[in-house]
Image (spheres, coloured by chain):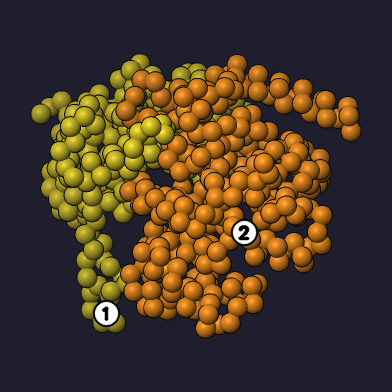
Chain colours: A yellow, B orange
Amino acid sequence: MADSIFQVSDLRVDVPDMTRKPLFGAAPRLEILKGISFEIPRGAVLGIVGGSGSGKTTLGRTLVRLVEPNAGRLLFDGRDIAHLSDAGMRPLRPRIQMIFQDPMSSLNPRLTVGRTIAAPLGAKVSDARVKAALEQVGLPADFAGRYPHELSGGQRQRVGIARAIAMRPDFILADEIVSGLDVSSQAQVLMLLEQLVADLGLTLVFISHDLSVIRRLCSRVIVLRAGEIVEDAATADLFERPRHAYTRELLDAIPIPDPSVRW
Amino acid sequence: MSGFLEIRGLSARLAGTGQRLLRAVDISLPAGSVRGLVGESGAGKSMIGKAVLGVLPKAVEIVEGEILLDGQDLLKVPPAERRRLIGAKAALIPQDPLTALNPSRRIGPQITDRLVDILGWEKARAASRALEVLAEVSIPEPERVMRLYPHELSGGMRQRILIASAFAAEPKLIVADEPTTALDVTVQKQILKLISALQARHGTALLFVTHDLGVVSKVCDTLSVLYAGKVVEDTTVERFFAAPQHPYSRALLAATPRHTDPAASLQPVPQAVIDAAMAEIAAADAAWSAHG
């Protein structure tokens, strides 16, 4: 399908299990991703959920080639990037952006917001794109002169989003970007993301352990468990007719804020 | 109708700057009941739990108020006596089981130490009690687990150990400070059900600190909603979820994710609500400075 930004087939990642390494000889391999296949159509918002250790973060990091897969094909815009060298990846990097979980540790404390957004553009702080990005994430223009420590958690996460969208990327990976936020800032950041997806036609992978957050934002959901996809379905289907027992277990475990709902 | 724990007019401030952290907090917790303390970061919910257990950071100064534990004002007794009182009657289930357990010591002594050192139990009695509570929190092979180190256990198992440790001395009050925030949803459910079951069986009063209204609706009887160190709503769980009274409570509930009703959840808290809540607090502060 030419309209897919990512085509992933039989993707495998394993690492040496150093806790079981014998004194001499190679360590046994620990499989993190056990043959994953899916596609991300252009303009889709794909949710990836799973418990701790299910491989969701590793899958995300492999998509953006921070991790090199051990086997399988990883087509980005029709081209296999599975084993591309760092130099080979470099021309593609501007088209693939990330938003990180912890905005404090992913923003340089010594750079102002303006410089943070301008740096990957190779532009000056006064660049129109910096101003436009701040406006798009709903931050006042004078925030360009502020440092991360002067901002609240929700505002910092907006800066992270602004830095990613300013590059006009083809693809954005958002890994647990609202987990560290209070419910009110969580709602604001999700609303913003929802609006940006609509306005800019972003293609987004949204990794989260929280299914209720996924429901609001994503059009399709992949449920991972122990490095395997257990369910891949349209969001409404997944929530209304979960097919796999693990998906049902995840859904049942969410405490719905209503004392009359049995748990 | 006085509770096992009664907090009356508790105000606290930062020693250096004089910034107010708690504003005339009133909380009543009858024996055997569960109260949720909810609010966003910085609202003071953990601080109330710390004040009850007498472990406030040095920089926090209690300005006025009473903390009555079983009828005795903890703020009026000498420190040594206070520690003994709290140690005998209250316990904590902390948030992060990995930092709460000493990584270089085996599980067994970490549970029995408190029983021996603070409550003066015989070592043998403490050890048999530890085995008993470990079995009660459904830890398989408790004798073996007593000899393990924290890193050999999963996050859910570690949290069970801390729950066992909290219930070991049969305290009448337990403060649970975000006990499941670090866990997966499926493990969270198991742990919350376990805490609820133990609480009901032992008739322990539970002060449950959390930011998650979903969790409150499942484990608590009553709740206090905190904003900037002030209780803005104090009500029962049934009444709160049917019709929250304070505008901030309503906004907080609307911001909570609810996958069964995606359109009506995850609503950002309107600025007008925050402004109104801040104005309310400024007015209360002004009145307070005027009288004192």
If the image is split into quadrants, where does the N terminus of chain A sit? Answer: top left
Q: Secondary structure at mark 2?
A: strand
What kind of residue is marked 2? Ala
Q: Quadrant of residue B43?
A: top right
Identify the residue position indicated by label 2 in the image.
B90
> In the image as oriented, which residue stretches furthest toward the left?
A1
Q: Position of residue B159 (x, y in %)?
A: 44, 59
Q: Pick the residue in front: A181 or A9.
A: A181
From the viewer's perspective, tell me whether residue A12 is left or right of residue A128. left
- Measuring 36% from the left and 67% from the top, which residue is drawn there? B139
Q: Position of residue B234 (x, y in %)?
A: 61, 32
State the separation of the CA atoms marked 2 and 1. 47 Å
From the viewer's perspective, tell me whether residue A190 is left or right of residue B41. left
Q: Quadrant of residue A214?
A: top left
What kind of residue is marked 1? Pro
Q: Nearer the viewer, mark 2 or mark 1?
A: 2
* Label ID, residue A22: 1
From the viewer's perspective, tell me whether residue B137 is left or right of residue B283. left
- Measuring 64% from the left and 77% from the top, which residue is drawn there? B120
Chain to which the residue tagged by mark 2 belongs: B
Q: Pick the residue in front: B29 or A218.
A: B29
Q: Position of residue A61 (x, y in %)?
A: 31, 46
Q: Pick the residue in front: A44 or B253.
A: B253
Chain to which the residue tagged by mark 1 belongs: A
Q: Pick the residue in front: A113 or B239.
A: B239
Q: Position of residue B142 (x, y in %)?
A: 38, 74
Within 10 Å of disc 2 (Cα), the crowding (few <14, some 14-19, many 20+) is many
Count how many numbered circles sit on residues in the image.
2
Q: Is residue B25 visible?
A: yes
Q: Secondary structure at mark 1?
A: loop
